[in-house]
Amino acid sequence: MKGRIPTFPKENRLVPVKLKSFHEYEVWSQDSAVERETQKQIELSLSPLQPRTFSIRGTCALCGVETMFRANFDYPNKAEDGRLIPNFRECLTCAHCGLKNRLRGVLHLFVQEFGPEAAQPIYITEQLGAAYRWLKGRFPAVSGSEFIPKSGPFGTSPRGIRNEDLCALTWPGDSFDFILSFDVLEHVADVNAAFSEICRCLRPGGKFLFTAPFRIDLRETLVRATVDSNGNIKHCLEPEYHGGNLSDSSKGTLCLRHFGWDTIQQLEKAGFSDAEVWLFWSRELGYIGGTQIAIAAYKKPDV
């Protein structure tokens, strides 16, 4: 997926709302209520009455072209009237680059807000997905990994796939200018250890951007399950599985948590000097399915 690092003309730029606390969210929620209701009605108008594959026209900011976004009813949501509606976050695939909504949106924000240069070292916590391939085609110094404990020691690359445990990374400290993680951290047993390791591996002034299930209406993270040091799982809620599983392709990966606003404090405790929740939505750019969310954190520069 070779290509250029995108630039964004005015009409393709995002203006994310950046919040640092639950209180700021409450203020925003009140102020944006009418706007969000309008967005909801727009999304309902785009969805066919009967489940089927369909497309909507828009602009892919990463490609810089008008395109068709393909949508389907895999993993559908329910509207208030009981009608099935698409899980737009997990579809709306650009016909040009093949990236779905949630990846296009966060990669857009990464390039626009962080301004990475081609030679800067980047680590993304995946190596087999579309986001890694897109980054590798534009940033030669990108590194990726997967969690495949049965494949061999961590820090090695059996069959060319680097094996890493986010709770105990083998990268040296101060290795990367940017670390990215897209819908991975909800599956990590000890997320506080993962946050600390990510901070350690960033250079001073480095930036961390991630997505994960985030309950914007909750002060505290919703714990769905826990995993002890022996790998024993304790379910606190009905099990929820996402996507595939490299160790067992017949099963998804257990979701351990939906993050809440205490994530800001967790990141700062892990060593980040600042953390923010970014909110965005765009019908034209195909970033829909309710308010879209990414979390950014910054490592304090050397003084």
Image (tube, rainbow, N blue to C red):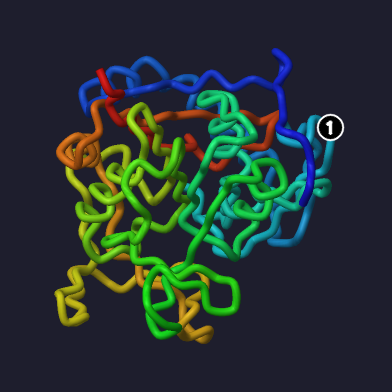
Q: Considering the image in quadrants, where does the C terminus appear? A: top left
Q: Position of residue 201 (x, y in %)?
A: 34, 46
Q: Residue at x 60, y 54 (%)?
A: 132
Q: Residue at x 59, y 25 (%)?
A: 112
Q: Amino acid at mark 1?
A: Val
Q: Position of residue 175 (x, y in %)?
A: 40, 44
Residue 81 seen in this snapshot: no
Q: Position of residue 262 (x, y in %)?
A: 19, 40
Q: Residue at x 16, y 82 (%)?
A: 230
The local crowd at label 1, few if under 14, some if 14 to 19, many if 20 or more residues have their Cα within 10 Å, is few
Q: Position of residue 187 (x, y in %)?
A: 34, 64
User: Is 237 or 108 nearer to us in this picture?
Assistant: 108
Residue 72 sits above or below residue 2 on the image: below
Q: Residue at x 33, y 30 (%)?
A: 204
User: Is 140 or 248 nearer to us in this picture?
Assistant: 140
Residue 28 sits above or below residue 243 on the image: above
Residue 247 seen in this snapshot: yes
User: Is 217 or 110 nearer to us in this picture?
Assistant: 110
Q: Quadrant of residue 242?
A: bottom left
What element does badge 1 sit on?
Answer: strand
Left or right: residue 148 versus residue 137 is left
Q: Which residue is mark 1?
A: 65
